[in-house]
Image (cartoon, grey):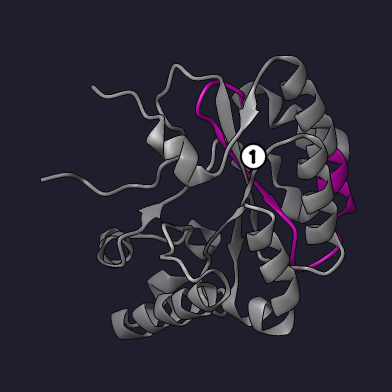
Amino acid sequence: MTTLSLVHRVPTRDKAVAFTFDDGPHPLYTRQLLDIFRKANGKATFFMIGQEIDAFEDIAAEVHQAGHEIANHTYSHPDLTKLALEEARAEIQQADERIRQITGQPVLSFRPPYFGVNEDILSLAAEFGYTSIGTVNGEAKDWEQPGVEFILDHTRPTIENGSIFMFHDGYGERAQTIEAVQVLLEELAAEGYRFLTVSELLELADQA
């Protein structure tokens, strides 16, 4: 039996990475990211909260129309491990339905708030057909606004083929994140990396 776990990096020989953004959509920062990725000729994955989609549905639609991936980050951002399983299922289901209304497509990826997972939550996500996504640069802690250099210093060492990076475009002041992402995209583009959605990156996984 396969043990379910979060995917932090995709084993691939391809020079490709995935940038992911949690807690949006946000009318300022999400749009700034759309502009940055358009200029970089890249795609990203936005792990959106259902309640934020309710608030900024037009922004979510812009993300989809620009060719980025929208993924599930629950409806109201609770720690799912502290809920009854049916409550956790409802959180995932409600967000799933909101995203489908925007995209008209199945949702493929899921990231649990606070990385709050156990076997039950991972199994629940798998029931929905999701791949549960982690990150390689959790120590960057961009959500704490630790400074652009701190974010860069704790992301650069994690860069390799198949890396999945996590940043935030919602819930607070995100100017440091935007600046750090801009720098990283320029550096990685110069090194020949491609910027893919999580689902695109997963398709590149080397077959064992």
Residue under label 1? 139
The amino acid type of the residue labelled 1 equals Glu
Query: Which type of secondary structure does the marked residue at label 1 adopt?
Result: helix
The x and y percentages for residue 169 are 75, 58
Neighbours of disc 1 within 10 Å: few (<14), some (14-19), many (20+): some
The x and y percentages for residue 73 are 53, 66
The x and y percentages for residue 78 are 52, 75
Residue 41: quarter of image? top right
The residue at 76%/28% (across/down) is 153
Position of the C terminus, as image quadrant, is: top left
> Which residue, as the protein is rendered here, is positioned at the far left?
1
Q: Which residues are magenta?
A: 159-180
The residue at 72%/83% (across/down) is 55
Vertical relation: 186 (above or below) 175: above
Residue 88: quarter of image? bottom left
The residue at 32%/47% (across/down) is 5
Disc count in the image? 1
